Image: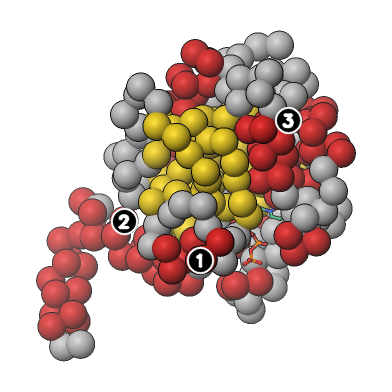
Amino acid sequence: MSRSPVKAVIPAAGLGTRFLPATKALPKEMMPVVDKPAIQYVVEEAVDAGIDDILVIIGRNKNAISNHFDSVPELEVKLMEKGDERRLERVMASSDLADIHFVRQGEPKGLGHAVLRARAHVGDSSFAVLLGDDLIDERDVLLTTMIEAHERTGAAVIALMEVDPDSIHLYGAAVAEPTDEDQIVRVTGLVEKPAREEAPSNLAVIGRYVLPASVFDILERTEPGKGGEIQLTDALQELAADAAGPGVLGVVFGGRRYDTGDRVDYIKAIVQLATDRDDLGSELRPWLKEFAAGL
Ligand code: UTP
């Protein structure tokens, strides 16, 4: 069993109900954030962390995702004829990014069920899971720190973020103890979407995981939990409770993260990323200031 994750899994088969009707015919992972679909940022993040074998778990409306990562020769020829080098480069970049594979999740039975669909492709190596609607700003480091912690210890590594206690019911919450390392905690328990008064902490699980292949055996026998779905959190809870194993570590992330499956966070992501961009920021910033002044 190898501890170096060479493959990443991106679950993108959820229903995206918070974004209906936009997600009726389009997976939420394909919603544009400025001028790239959310999932492209996530694939780029995996590639930047050294992983270029990527399995996307797709549901209904799968074609939009697979088409995006395919090359479109007629579009490339048109841009070439027009001499539009810049756009040609951007169009080709999305199909040359990585070695991308797809597998279907017949029914959206939960994140744990989606991850289990990756078993045949991943085999017995450790692997990374990146949620396709969760963006980590490319200027902040997370996945690399998680991979290093996993390679060193063999533990399952999850990403945690401190959130307002009033919003902990939207996340999995961790029971955590400090370790010798600054950013890293030992996770001794997890509760999926707890009420504020039942939450063990305000450390929320966010969409990055580095997991040992042993999680697949646990997921095979994990019963549906909260919301009638097979929860990845329940399988991680079992790893955390196994005193004989390497357990679960959490990397506490203090950087910029956008949940593009949530409407307000989605809008924030677009504003933040567009204002920071060289080609758009100078035009957008003065308008934004004027707009905000009028609120
Ligand atoms: P979410 O809970 O955010 O996705 O799942 P959702 O169910 O699509 O969202 P809403 O609440 O209805 O708006 C987190 C990630 O797990 C994937 C989703 O696509 C998302 O990337 N997922 C979830 C699956 O792939 N399969 C599932 O059965 C559930």
Q: Is mark 2 within 8 Å of ligand 1?
A: no
Question: Which numbered disc, 3 or 1, marks the residue that appears first in the sequence?
Answer: 1
Q: CA distance from mark 2 to mark 1?
A: 31 Å
Q: Does the image show residue 103?
A: yes
Mark 3 neighbour class, 10 Å CA radius: few under 14, some 14 to 19, many 20 or more = many
Q: Nearer the viewer, mark 3 or mark 1?
A: 1
Asked if the residues shown at circle 3 and circle 1 are in contact, with their CB atoms under 8 angstroms apart, the answer is no
Out of 45 and 113, give the one closest to the viewer. 113
User: Which SS class for mark 1?
Assistant: helix
The picture places residue 188, in percent across and down from the top left corner, at 57, 36
Question: Which numbered disc, 2 or 1, marks the residue that appears first in the sequence?
Answer: 1
Mark 1 neighbour class, 10 Å CA radius: few under 14, some 14 to 19, many 20 or more = some
In the figure, is residue 17 to the left or right of 80? right
Q: Tell me the kind of residue under disc 3.
A: Val
Residue under the point 35% across and 22% down: 180
Q: Tell me the kind of residue under disc 1.
A: Arg
Label 1, on which residue? 196
Return the mark for residue 36: none
Q: CA distance from mark 3 to mark 2?
A: 35 Å
Q: Nearer the viewer, mark 2 or mark 1?
A: 1
Q: Does the image show residue 260?
A: no
Out of 218 and 145, give the one closest to the viewer. 218
Return the mark for residue 215: 3
Label 2, on which residue? 273
On screen, residue 56 above or below 165: above
User: Which SS class for mark 2?
Assistant: helix
Question: Which numbered disc, 3 or 2, marks the residue that appears first in the sequence?
Answer: 3
Residue under the point 40% across and 57% down: 163
